Amino acid sequence: MKIAFQMDPIGPIDIKGDSTFRLAEEAQARGHELFYYTPDRLAYDDGRVTARGWPLEVRRVEGDHYSLGAETTVDLSSFDVVWLRQDPPFDMFYITTTHLLQRLAPGTLVVNDPFWVRNYPEKLLILDFPELTPPTAIARDLDTIKAFRARHGDVILKPLYGNGGAGVFHLPESDRNLSSLHEMFTGFSREPLIVQKYLPEIAQGDKRVILVDGEPVGAINRVPGAGETRSNMHVGGRPEKIALSARDREICALIGPLLREKGQVFVGIDVIGSYLTEINVTSPTGLQELERFDGTNAAGLIWDAIGSRLA
């Protein structure tokens, strides 16, 4: 197959943790042809969806993990698969790339399906499953957020379209900074905020469950560092081996069919205690950690699922 990766710059990635690198490595091992470009090089040009990038070869050598061929502009409709793998923020730039990539259907498979990535961002898709989630509010209005905290006490406040733990605040009932934080967020963004009831189980970790075509294939636990509420590995969360629980499987059984139907082949959900807190469809992580802990080649399972969809 001919595979194109739309991703953030490949040079600075951590080859021991980056899931896109692992997907590319597995595809190359299967004999597929790789192409790489950054999202700013995606274009709609006179009826074609094009990308300016490079043929790609990857290898597991730190500091020398990739080689690029000659820069060229390609028609993405000539590829079998295009991966939508750049990280958020989920802003209008990101959304525009989903509109352009959507135009490749049905001849080229875009993973995850960009139409549903656009319509199911991680902190909004959970609203379809209120029975699985902690008490949640999405609002820009300060009075609404204050009323939510008055009902629920300790809360977590975060940007609706952020990622990697950036801008996440734990606000105990006694904290007096809510108005100041609201002023700061609304001063540079027109987006609403999301506020959720604080779950003290976060001290034991935030479980990342990986689903492939709607089926759970394993999990890792991300434990916050000392003095931290956030468990994201981007901000120092420690990954640990953990098994799927009965509750994890129950959550996956409820959300999996929808993910599969909407073309979300690689998804990572976040579970704290017994609650589902996010459904990550834009650029999920965790493949390499799962493989190290459990020996589960989730990248291989993802490529198997893609092969089945193409067939």
Image: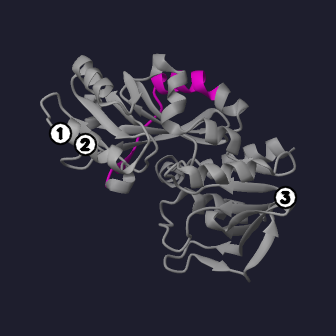
Please check the rendered image and state whether residue 243 is part of the magenta-colored stretch, yes or no: yes
Residue drawn at point x = 51 percent, y = 67 percent: 15
Q: Nearer the viewer, mark 3 or mark 1?
A: 1
Vertical relation: 211 (above or below) 43: above
Provide the residue designation for mark 3: 77
Residue drawn at point x = 50 percent, y = 28 percent: 126
Look at label 3 and name its amino acid: Ser
Residue drawn at point x = 37 percent, y = 21 percent: 135
User: Residue 33 vs residue 114: left or right?
Assistant: right
Q: Is residue 167 visible?
A: no
> Which mark, by number, is residue 181?
2
Look at label 2 and name its amino acid: Leu
Could you say which is closer to the camera, residue 128 or residue 90? Answer: 90
Q: Do the residues labelled 1 and 2 touch (CB within 8 Å)?
A: yes
Provide the residue designation for mark 1: 177
Which residues lie in the magenta part?
236-256
Local secondary structure at mark 3: helix
Q: In which quarter of the image is residue 53?
A: bottom right
Could you say which is closer to the camera, residue 270 or residue 139? Answer: 139
Q: In which quarter of the image is the C terminus?
A: top right
Residue 13 lies, in percent from the top left, at: 50, 68
Q: Which of marks 3 and 2 is in front?
A: 2
Residue 97 lies, in percent from the top left, at: 66, 54
Look at label 1 and name its amino acid: Asn
Q: Quadrant of residue 28?
A: bottom right
Separation of marks 3 and 1 at Cα, in angstroms: 50 Å
Could you say which is closer to the camera, residue 47 or residue 294? Answer: 47
